[in-house]
Image (cartoon, rainbow, N blue to C red):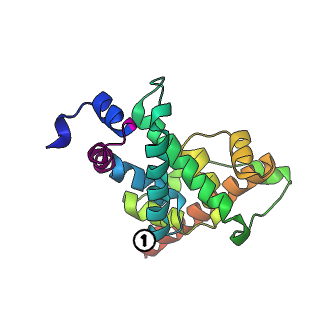
Amino acid sequence: MHKTISEEKLIQGCVEGSRYAQKVLYEKYRTLMFAICMRYAKNRDEAEDVMIDGFMKIYTKISEFRKQGSFEGWLKRIMINTAINNYRLNLKHYYNLQIDDEKYFEIKDETDVFKNTYSADYLIKLIQELPDGYRMVFNMYEIEGYSHKEIAEALDISVSTAKTQLFHAKKTLKNKLSKINQEEIY
């Protein structure tokens, strides 16, 4: 089937507008890209919309790929930026809490509280349940590795708000997992 197409030929085919190459690219990377979108979206439908938008951007910008990093990394960056743009476009529907109190920035790692192993699907579900701002900041910082400054710039919020939202996201997730662990003990 299409598994014999090299990455270079696949990219070149997409640059030339080949529908077949675009289909192969989509088939090859859709699972990974959907997983990224699921982390940022509130639900499956929103994740699918973001993913389709992301692939459309990939198809139109693929000629700009300069081979200065991995192709997969380039695809991920476009998908993440598409998810961030989706969030920003819908920002009027979201609530951002602005707190500048330094005491909120102390985040302690208490991983020993969690004795269970959770499936990726279950953890994604918990992340999706976070308030929108918390979810965006948590994904960008903990999963994608953005700095607080980069998050603040991307989401058009202050650095302290980014830190606060990360704190609250972690606290919310910790509380949910602690509650689940307590329920399983009794």
Q: Residue furthest left?
A: 1
Residue 115 pos. (x, y %): 43, 57
Q: Name the residue that disc number 1 marks.
A: 185
Stretch of the chain drawn in magenta: 15-28
Give whichever of 164, 17 is nearer the camera. Answer: 17
Q: Tag 1, which secondary structure?
A: helix
At 36% from the left edge and 39% from the top edge, which residue is drawn?
Answer: 14
- Left or right: residue 155 compared with residue 68: right
- Left or right: residue 11 compared with residue 94: left
Q: Residue furthest top?
A: 68
Q: Is residue 127 above or below residue 138?
A: below
- Left or right: residue 66 compared with residue 94: left
Q: Is residue 157 above or below residue 89?
A: above
Give whichever of 98, 16 is nearer the camera. Answer: 16
Residue 165 pos. (x, y %): 70, 57
Q: Amino acid at mark 1?
A: Ile
Residue 40 pos. (x, y %): 54, 58
Q: Is residue 78 above or below residue 84?
A: above
